[in-house]
Image: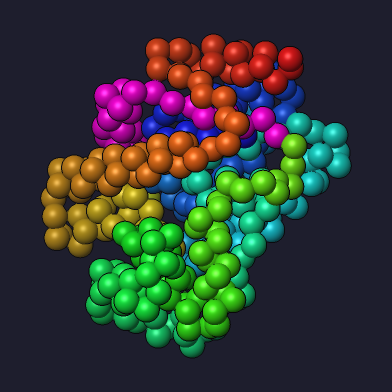
């Protein structure tokens, strides 16, 4: 399992490692599941996909919401199938919740009630995440303390759990407080890839610039013209910013600057996740080629 911050080059390392191990890659990313936006969601390139089979990438329609619970079911099916065929698995991603969901051991709450979800989504649109977060803090301070109050989806799900019943609230509290508790479904080697912040900030700037140069704006324009994006996908870094550019609200330069800023905030959250990883081998990657890092990882797995 390779976990690390955005813009570090995890996919290139995973491809090199999978080739050395004769493995296939299962991606643990909340936005790479979506079709139609391979540039904006940093999906594997055509060359990388040709070199090594990738699973759970680009299969969800842009208008459909997608959850970690649904991902967990699909990830387990993919991994179980690969292992049944005698294949090794490289699990790679930067979404901490999806990583843990793939490894197993999480208990998800009940399915959302459509009427409750619709009412909360209207409130989220009209009042904003800050208003719902304030209400969550008032109604259940303990649940609020284990919820990312800047993340609209997490706040909505927490509020939804209160509306459903208290058992769901307890499940969400447990999920937030004990996310890396024992109970993995699979025996695995956990690797945290890292680099210092200056290197990460430089790579973030380069990635965002490359994303725009490669056609992310046209990609988003085409997907938006086909219909409304799901609330889940609208949370993807770059979607909100470039949408504002397409709508004439901000300039492309402003959208690029905001995308870089949001990506840096995401990286800070990912680094916080890394500090919670139990028994992870921390591997610095700055200055090394993907092949060199993969060679070190392959040797570590083989010993």
Q: Is residue 17 above or below residue 81?
A: above
Question: Quick check: can you spot residue 192?
Answer: yes
For image coordinates 55% across by 51% down, the residue present is 179
Chief secondary structure of the magenta span?
Answer: helix
- Residue 90 position within the rendered picture, expressed as x and y whole percent measured from the top left: 66, 33
Q: Is residue 202 magenta?
A: yes
| The residue stretch that appears in magenta | 188-216
Q: Nearer the viewer, residue 194 or 44?
A: 194
Q: Is residue 175 above or below residue 143?
A: above
Question: Quick check: can you spot residue 221?
Answer: no
Q: Nearer the viewer, residue 183 or 58?
A: 183
For image coordinates 64% across by 41% down, the residue present is 26
- Residue 115 position within the rendered picture, expressed as x and y whole percent measured from the top left: 49, 88
Q: Is residue 38 magenta?
A: no
- Residue 214 position within the rendered picture, expressed as x and y whole percent measured from the top left: 34, 37
Residue 25 located left or right of residue 8:
right
For image coordinates 48% across by 14% down, the residue present is 289
- Residue 74 position within the rendered picture, expressed as x and y whole percent measured from the top left: 68, 55
Residue 187 located left or right of residue 84:
left
């Amino acid at each position: 399992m390779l976990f690390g911050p955005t813009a570090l080059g995890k996919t290139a390392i995973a491809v090199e490692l999978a080739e050395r191990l004769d493995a296939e890659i299962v991606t643990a990313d909340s936005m790479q599941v979506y079709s139609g936006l391979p540039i904006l969601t940093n999906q594997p390139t055509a060359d990388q996909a040709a070199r090594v089979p990738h699973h759970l990438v680009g299969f969800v329609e842009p208008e459909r919401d997608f959850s970690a619970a649904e991902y967990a079911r699909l990830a387990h099916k993919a991994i179980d199938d690969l292992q049944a065929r005698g294949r090794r698995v490289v699990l790679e991603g930067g979404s901490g919740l999806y990583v843990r969901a793939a490894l197993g051991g999480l208990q998800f709450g009940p399915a959302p009630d459509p009427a409750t979800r619709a009412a909360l989504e209207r409130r989220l649109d009209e009042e904003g995440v800050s208003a719902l977060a304030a209400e969550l803090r008032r109604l259940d301070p303990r649940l609020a303390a284990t919820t990312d109050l800047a993340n609209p989806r997490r706040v909505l799900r927490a509020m939804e759990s209160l509306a459903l019943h208290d058992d769901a609230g307890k499940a969400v509290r447990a999920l937030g407080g004990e996310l890396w508790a024992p109970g993995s479904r699979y025996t695995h080697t956990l690797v945290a890839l890292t680099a210092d912040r200056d290197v990460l900030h430089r790579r973030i700037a380069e990635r965002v610039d490359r994303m725009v140069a490669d056609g992310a704006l046209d990609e988003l324009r085409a997907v938006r013209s086909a219909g409304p994006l799901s609330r889940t996908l609208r949370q993807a870094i770059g979607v909100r910013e470039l949408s504002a550019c397409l709508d004439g609200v901000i300039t492309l330069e402003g959208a690029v600057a905001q995308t870089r800023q949001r990506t840096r905030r995401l990286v800070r959250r990912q680094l916080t996740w890394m500090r919670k990883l139990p028994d992870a081998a921390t591997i610095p990657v700055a200055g090394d080629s993907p092949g060199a890092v993969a060679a070190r990882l392959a040797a570590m797995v083989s010993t």
